[in-house]
Image (tube, grey):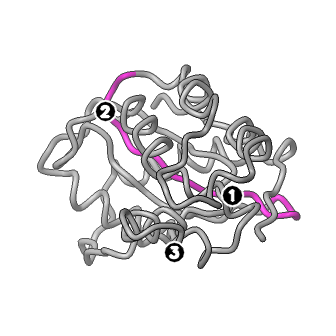
């Protein structure tokens, strides 16, 4: 199973250079943000799969933040395009290193619900992806339920009850996530929120 990691450190660097983007009453224009987002997902393949936003803490322990699907179930995007879409549409989560949650959510009237959803991903340091070319459409919801229960990502508010028997595919995906998490533990850097 092909898997990889997206390091979000370059995104935080763009944010630090543009700290005032959430001090205005209009949609923020962040110089260089889109280009940096494209660069961090450049190595992600344009295939269907699953992904996991998460963070390493100061002890280099992993915490899952959000689990998602790409090209499976109701989503039509590939892993690469789905991750780029989330990085651009939910970029307000990265400003949590400079601004309080309340400040970001209340920055403007329009988009408040989207920013509320986005700040749940605050503190993410990496996104791990796993390509799942053999996962069939009828398996998706059960595998998703298994993985959400096992990984316990804090931003997944919709949770379905998993089947009584864990799915073989869910175990393989979980193992792929764990392998990537462990491979990058020694070089992990935590993010500190305001």
Residue at 40%, 39% (x, y): give it. 85
Report the residue marked by disc 3: 106
Looking at the rendered image, the quarter that the C terminus falls into is bottom right
Q: Secondary structure at mark 3?
A: loop
Direction from residue 137 to residue 38 in the image, left or right: right
Report the residue marked by disc 1: 55
The image quadrant of residue 62 is: bottom right
Q: Is 18 drawn above or below residue 25 in the view shown?
A: above
Nearer the observer, 78 or 21: 21
Q: Are marks 3 and 2 in contact (CB under 8 Å)?
A: no
Q: Secondary structure at mark 1?
A: strand
Q: Position of residue 13 (x, y in %)?
A: 77, 40
The circle drawn on residue 48 is 2
- Using the numbered discs, state the Cα–Cα distance from disc 3 to disc 2 in whole angstroms: 35 Å
Q: Position of residue 125 (x, y in %)?
A: 69, 51
The image quadrant of residue 4 is: top right
């Amino acid at each position: 199973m092909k898997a990889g990691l997206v390091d979000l450190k370059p995104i935080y660097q763009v944010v630090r250079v543009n700290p005032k983007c959430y001090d205005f009453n209009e949609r923020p224009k962040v110089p260089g943000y889109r280009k940096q987002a494209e660069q961090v997902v450049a190595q992600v393949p344009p295939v269907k799969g699953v992904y996991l936003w998460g963070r390493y803490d100061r002890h280099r322990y992993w915490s899952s933040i959000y689990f998602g699907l790409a090209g499976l179930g109701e989503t039509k995007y590939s892993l690469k395009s789905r991750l780029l879409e989330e990085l651009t549409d939910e970029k307000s989560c990265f400003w949590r290193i400079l601004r309080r949650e309340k400040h970001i959510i209340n920055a403007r009237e329009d988009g408040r619900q989207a920013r509320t959803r986005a700040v749940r991903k605050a503190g993410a340091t990496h996104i791990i992806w796993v390509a799942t070319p053999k996962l069939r459409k009828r398996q998706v919801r059960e595998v998703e339920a298994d993985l959400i229960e096992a990984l316990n990502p804090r931003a997944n508010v919709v949770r379905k009850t998993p089947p009584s028997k864990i799915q073989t595919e869910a175990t393989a995906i979980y193992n792929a996530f764990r392998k990537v998490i462990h491979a990058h533990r020694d070089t992990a850097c935590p993010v500190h929120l305001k």
